[in-house]
Amino acid sequence: MRKLALLAGTIFIGLAHGASAETALKMWYHGAGNEVESKLINQIVADFNASQDDWSVSLESFPQGAYNDSVVAAALAGNLPDILDVDGPVMPNWAWAGYLQPLPIDESVIADFLPGPKGYWDGKLYSVGLWDAAVALVTRKSILEKYGIRTPTLDKPWTGAEFNEILAKLKASGDFEYPLDLGMAWTGEWYPYAFSPLLQSFGGDIVDRDTYASADGKLNGDAALAFGEWWQSLFKDGMTPGTSQDPADRDNGFNEGKYAIAWNGNWAATGMLKVYGDDLLFLPAPDFGSGPKIGAASWQFGVSSASKHPDGAAAFIEFALQDKYLAAFSDGIGLIPATPTAAAMTENYKEGGPLAVFFDLSKAQAVLRPVTPGYVVQAKVFEKAMADIANGADVADTLDAAVDEIDSDIEKNQGYGHQS
Amino acid sequence: MAALSPGNQGVRLAVRYLVLILIALIFIFPLLFMLMNSLKPTEQLLADTSSLRAFLPVGDLSLDNYVDAFKRAPVGTFVFNSVLVTGVTVIASLFICSLAAFSFVFLDWVGRGILLSIILATLIIPFETIAIPLLLIVSKLPWFGLNGLEIGWLNTYRVQIIPWIADGLTIFLFVQYFKDLPSELVEAARVEGASWWQVYRRVIMPLSGPVLATGAILKFLVMYNQYLWPLIVVQEESYRPVMVGLGYFFQLNVAWGEVMAYLSLITLPVLAFYLALQRAFIASIASTGVKG
Amino acid sequence: MASRLTTSNRAGWGFAIPGFALIAIFIVLPFFFAFGLSLTDQRLVSPNPTRYVGLDNYRELLDVTVITLEPQRDEAGELIRDEDGNLEYPKVRDITRSDDYPQYSGMREWFRWQSGQNAKVVIASDVVFMKALVNTLVFVMVVAPVQAGLALVLALLINQRIRGINIFRTIYFMPVVVSIVVVSLLWRFIYSGNDGLLNNLLDALTFGAWQPIDWLGNPSTALGSIMAMSIWQAVGFHMVIWLSGLQTISPTLYEAATIEGASGWQTFRYVTWPGLRNTAVLILIVITMQAFAVFAQINVMTSGGPLDSTQTLVFQAVVRGYGKQDISGGATISVILFLLVLSISLLQRWLTRDRR
């Protein structure tokens, strides 16, 4: 209710100011239902509106699960707002389709940002995020000690073989329901975000990033086949829960001691810290041959093509990029602040903070998901392939089918605007 | 029957009740599950799901989940929107569809057969498959409101109501029912000089209690559970209905307790509507008994 | 029939036109729109101009062909057998991905059977669609009769005049009141593989002999589990429709049957069932339509998996049209579904036609 009052307040202020020649700007955000996030974003909007007399931003929040569909529907119906919130890997799709226009802000503002939160498409900046997200292997010091497992470092991560041995050892101990939790219950973007870096570490990829014209040889090449076989073995050997994992187990299984290691994001870290405190460890991804990799990019802000006031929209986005807001979001929902100066201001990411390791992980290992308008489709194809292989489908056939589908989609979209 | 002794009758009755109760157990559990779990903290709820404890009011019970649900989302707004949209649509639908069905069954006119066939064919079209074309249509439709001519129906109540008023199923429901009504009633009324409108209003409608109730329930359920359509035509929170509001509760670490509280809250209006209708429904049957 | 009708073009059109106009604008028009889309390469999100592609979308979905695989032989011409003595065949992917057979490019194995020493393999250009088609038909063929039958049994049961019957009627209707999305969420807990309520219940009933089944995670049980839940959820609704049919049968007919000493079955056969004729047609059609449109359960519970065992047509139409931004492909599935159901209902009408 407080949120509604605040929202009503914002709109009311907007109206009242409207009389004094302020230009109204609409903004959409994906955080409806998340109290902390709503409070933070409302604070930024309120501060911005109070800070100047030219623009007045009003906010409309959507439940995250429905946000992308809402935006696409609104775009089709010609009803986009001025400022849009966009998930990093989806941005090229919206930019290519003409939902977004290049972001007119001075790039010196984001000079010291992490690479993940900066959204470039076709050589132009379209979106900027206040934070990044990162994934790590989460486990407990006490587990590693008990089973005599080496603690990996950024410089010397576990190798693939080492990782497999560790899982086998933990499995053999019988102390856990599963040695590893990959989070198969989180269907959707989690699959490509969390699992395609593992494929990249094997040397494959979702699509050929040199041309973005085909997935052939990348998603079904030898490296990808090796990855696929390994992936399937995790499920066949009972190393990790499969696609029918209960979502509640994903949320709480590690904290209840059912799983020894979890492949999980920094946004879940605060909850785990509450349970395990100092015993908790965040470890870099294993290196399967082509270096350890994790996914990058999270939600970002951009200006819609429908906006008649890109300067006002950009002014708001620039305003939101202040370190104090980056830090506030990080403290509120555990995300990685986009700049080192903001990181220093936070509880978790300051020097020696419990999650500081994520900042380094993000800097050292993060790889963007394929920067192409076709990613939206490729992500869905990849997700289905991962689920099917986990459920025992033939690896080569499944990856071939995925390649065929991706290639035919690229062809139908006339190359998605990549210059070949 | 007469040959049965009173004792035997008692046994038969007991068996009947036993069967009824056993079946009832199979059907009641989702509501019990929802209500009981809405009173429990999420951790306890999850621990209880694997046993019959999930259906019992045991453990740490409180109304906290309800309080939190109201904090998380404007539940009142969502329920109000859904009830308003549903109520208006149901009433309009019963009127428009019964009128059309009346015309199809009792009147003979050029084009009757072909129109009815088209309407019945639309039964086969799943809404999901026409949602996007329909979105493009309603975004261009004009409306004459208080502010004069407007183009586009997005972010209104009417966009959630008007496209749903007429549908093949409701018309078909009435058609099948009207076919069973004795046609002498209509003929007699016409002989006495009643207009068609009077026949519809004073002869047929009073006999239509059961089908009106069935049609109302059917439409109510469809409308109250709308998700995809409001999702794509409504971008403002103030017009959002309950099922879209459900999305507010699916954050990271789903608070299942709150989800159950929200579900219980939004199910109440449906239950109330059904109970109210059931009374009217039975009353109408008792007073008619029309078929021969 | 004709005798009861009175010719009146003005009143007839006047009464029917509001309903018909609304249906024409909001259902028929968008459907024609969708049909038009199915003949183009329109994407949901794209700056590219739309092109007319004729029946390409249909061909991509429906292309099916049979290839014959001969068992592999070694250099001496002997048949190669694996450890279990089974014949070995060349891999299908070596054919479909080979430049020697451009006509099979992009196709995948759907299923195969043995014909002598050769294997006949059915390959389809869209195996997922084919599986969705089969699953949808199975769903309809199981759910429609079972649900209609159970609903009738419940309606007869609930049509007794005994004290408290209204309470039972209300309870039987409960699952209908709760939306299918919500019901699907709840049943996910019940069907859970390790520690779900259903497994625990069966375990208790068999005194521990029960091996837990991952109901939704196993390709052989997933569709069945979803069908069972769907029947359970909607049976109360059809019970109410049966009931409204039952309650309009005149009590005097039953009295007459009792006087003539008719048995329970005879009463049902000669009094009840004839009185339910129009209701039966209604229910059969309604259930069939609803079963063909199955979507929400799949979306919430399995997303079509595991291994496509729960793919359905509407789910695929949505996945393609929205998720994969292939709006023309999604529209094509809807048109195929429409034509399929239309032919089935014409057949149904012909079979249940009045033979008098």
Image: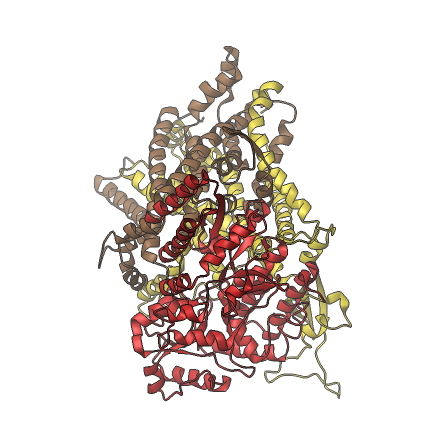
Chain colours: A red, B brown, C yellow
Instruction: Measuring from the top left, give residue B62's x and y in whole percent.
Output: 23, 53
Q: Is residue A335 above or below residue C49?
A: below
Q: Residue at x 67, y 62 (%)?
A: A410
Instruction: Measuring from the top left, give residue B6's x and y in whole percent.
Output: 22, 39
Quadrant where the C terminus of chain A lies? bottom right
Q: Is residue B238 visible?
A: yes
The picture quadrant where one finds residue A289 is: bottom right
Q: Is residue A413 above or below residue A346?
A: above
Q: Is residue B279 left or right of C44 when viewed as pictured? A: left
The picture quadrant where one finds residue A369 is: bottom right
Q: Is residue A161 above or below residue B99?
A: below
Instruction: Measuring from the top left, give residue C318's x and y in whole percent.
Output: 56, 53
Q: Is residue C210 visible?
A: no
Q: Residue at x 61, y 41 (%)?
A: C30
- Residue sitting nearer the eye, A33 or B256: A33
Q: Residue at x 61, y 71 (%)?
A: A399
The picture quadrant where one finds residue B52 is: bottom left
